[in-house]
Amino acid sequence: MPEKTKVILIDDSGFMRILLSDLLYEDPMIDILARARNGLEGVNQARLLKPDIAITNMEMPEYDGCYFVKTMMHEMPLPIIILSSLKRYDKRISEALDAGAFAYLQKPDKTEVQEGYRTLKKLVHTASQLRYTQPDILPIPTQRKTRFDIIAIGVSTGGPKAVEYIITHLPHTLSAPVVIAQHMPQPFIESFVRRLKESTGRNISVARHGESLMPAHIYLAPGIANVRITQKESQSPAFTFVNDTYKEFNNPSIDCLFESIADVFGNRALAIVLTGMGKDGVYGLQKIKEQGGFTVAQDEASSVVYGMPKAAYESGAATYQMPVNEIPYFITRSLYHA
């Protein structure tokens, strides 16, 4: 039988410590090792008990959540979930995420509590699959060499909203290029790119044949051809439009793009399959996984159509599965964590 995920809870509210304990105890694979009242007490408990995951409030007297995150990521890195009433754009939340926290959630409302706070339980299980082994991974300097050289996303039905959310929540200091294959006719892809540029302020464009990939740039595959990424000796990786056809979908084929990424980038690729109908992306995702890259699928609850991500996860091509609102933070943390 698999081992339980060992968790410590840190919150200055006795009520919240009891509430979260009760909710998490409903999951037979989660074990609450200890509860702490502030960041310092949490650090001491973590040093002693060596938990798999920590869940911490942000605002606490004397030693807050940021103290806990910074201390633990320096001494013994582990996945840390920030659970706070502060909004995502609060600078204290950004500081904690930049310092190494795995993810952020708002404290649950009444409905979420009544439903068992499934979002937190899913996030605990996702985080339990991560292993942080380098004691000096953070803080993250912007010039640091990242773990991955490319982020690839394949998506179909229900994709625009998911794609926009992920792009909006990726850091502006992201150095790796992002390449997206969205099942959509060419005129809609072009208008989607224009809207994304306006709403996010990012460098976004439709990929062109022969164009070299640039750092910190976001590309959407066009709807007029299948796209491969190729690399000649001493040259940068570039887009190549091909006439090859694939079983699941074409123009653009996610399988085609992912297969080429596996060939060029190998274990330096992080690839994600989002909401969509069918099985496009499964074959290419498996190729990336075989090369040692990271592979992720969106979960059922946050998918508009749980076809492609279901096929990717159930086939084993996707190693991780998570809700769309956690994917940007997973990308950011994975880029710098071993």
Image (cartoon, helix red, strand yellow):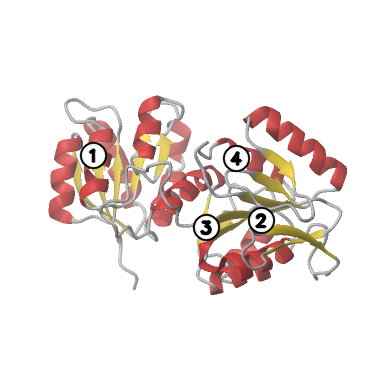
Pointer 2: what residue? 306
Distance from Cα at disc 2 to Cα at disc 1: 37 Å
In space, the residues marked 4 and 1 are separated at their CA atoms by: 28 Å
User: Quarter of the image containing the C terminus?
Assistant: bottom left
Residue situated in front as seen by the camera: 185 or 226: 226
Q: Which mark is residue 167?
A: 4
Label 4 vs label 3, nearer the camera: 4
- Please name which of the two marks, 3 or 2, marks the residue nearer to the observer: 3
Q: Amino acid at mark 3?
A: Gln
First of labels 4, 2 by sequence position: 4
Can residue 232 be seen at all in this image of the molecule? Answer: yes
Q: Amino acid at mark 2?
A: Tyr
Q: Between tags 2 and 1, which lies in front? A: 1
Residue drawn at x 53%, y 40% as measured from the top left: 170
Q: Give the percent coordinates (x, y) of residue 175.
A: 52, 46
Q: Residue 68, labelled with which disc?
A: 1
Numbered label attached to residue 321: 3
Q: Nearer the viewer, mark 4 or mark 2?
A: 4
Question: Label 1 crowding class (10 Å Cα cut-off): few <14, some 14-19, many 20+?
Answer: many
**Position in image of residue 311 (x %, y %):** 64, 66
